[in-house]
Amino acid sequence: MDIKLLRAFVTLSQSAGYRSAAESLCVTQPALTKQIQLLEHLLGITLFQRGRHGARLTSAGEQLLPEARKALEYYEKCLNKAGDIRKGKAGKLVLGFGISSFRMAPEKVAVFRSVFPDVQVFLNDMPSGVQCHALLEGHLQAGFVRLPVSEKLQSQVLAEEKLVLAVASDRFVSLENALKLIENSQLLQLSPNRGEGLSTQTASFLTSHHLSPTRVAAADDIQTLLALVAAGDGVALLPESVRHILPSGVNLIALEGEYTTWQTGIAWNSRIKDPLRDHFLDIVTTPSAVLNGGCREKSSGPDY
């Protein structure tokens, strides 16, 4: 059913007659008459009783009028909702974040929600490699990832991450003794399928410092690793950002040299048009966003 027919019905019911209703709808009286007749034909009921005093609702028309009004209100809400989605003011935003953005991602989301309260935001903890695949497939709108990313994605640097050594707090460890401790202690690592980038960083650091830990154990999440470290079960090479979720009983030792730093940032698939995502990117990259002719600076390289 054409929504114009319901609008004609509701408008005529609220008007003194066909003339004033036609003027409100910006149509001719014959055109309005045809719309009402078509609606009555489609519904199989008479809606108006026509006479010298204009058009009066029949009993059937009076019963249908409240539902017709609701239908028009819903239609207008639908149009407004579509407009908000098109303008990036409403809808759903699906984001990814990883180990190095434990604090950054929620903080950026909080700022975005304060500006766009009608947007539903879903924040998913997943490795950078998984995020990049999801971005290419269109399952994520943006992701906080380890850089660089695939050349098929665009990205913006947000911060520099550092590699630290997590040790039990009852052990005093100087920077000079940190390497010996790694060599002589059980090395607790995040499973490669959970943190491929961190695994690669750790391997590069160990190789560059000629370290070969005799015992290695793996866990699937950072919290478990930190709990094992606190219990004195070993040491772990982790991103410095874990300090935001550090439990009691664990100290972090800063490391120096090659393969101790890397960049983190936000990545997205620019091939997919998404005004809502772009609003989020504007908030995330301000004031550090680098704009070039209205486009964010592109960073490319191998995904790891």
Image (cartoon, rainbow, N blue to C red):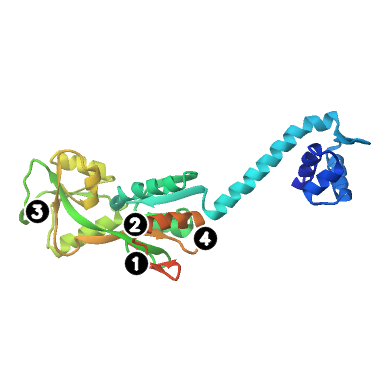
Q: How many marks?
A: 4
State the separation of the CA atoms marked 4 and 1: 24 Å
**Which numbered tag is attached to residue 145?**
2
Disc 1 marks which residue? 302
Cβ atoms at labels 2 and 3 below 8 Å apart: no
Of 167 and 286, the residue lying toward us = 286
Q: CA distance from mark 4 to mark 3?
A: 48 Å
Residue kind at label 1, given as amino acid type: Pro
Which badge, 1 or 2, is on the more N-terminal residue? Answer: 2
User: Label 4: which residue?
Assistant: 273
Alpha carbon distance from label 1 to label 2: 13 Å
Q: What's the amino acid at mark 4?
A: Lys
Which residue occupies the extreme right position in the image?
Answer: 52
Q: In the shown orientation, is residue 177 left or right of residue 25? A: left
Q: Which is nearer the N-term, disc 4 or disc 3?
A: 3
Q: Amino acid at mark 2?
A: Val
Distance of label 2 from label 3 (alpha carbons): 28 Å
Residue labelled with disc 3:
178
Label 4 with label 1: CB-CB less than 8 Å: no
x, y (%) of residue 197? 29, 58
Estimate the x, y position of residue 152 in percent, counting from the top left. Answer: 43, 66
> In front: 83, or 211?
83
Q: Nearer the viewer, mark 4 or mark 2?
A: 4
Under mark 3, the amino acid is: Ala
**Which secondary structure lies at badge 3?**
helix
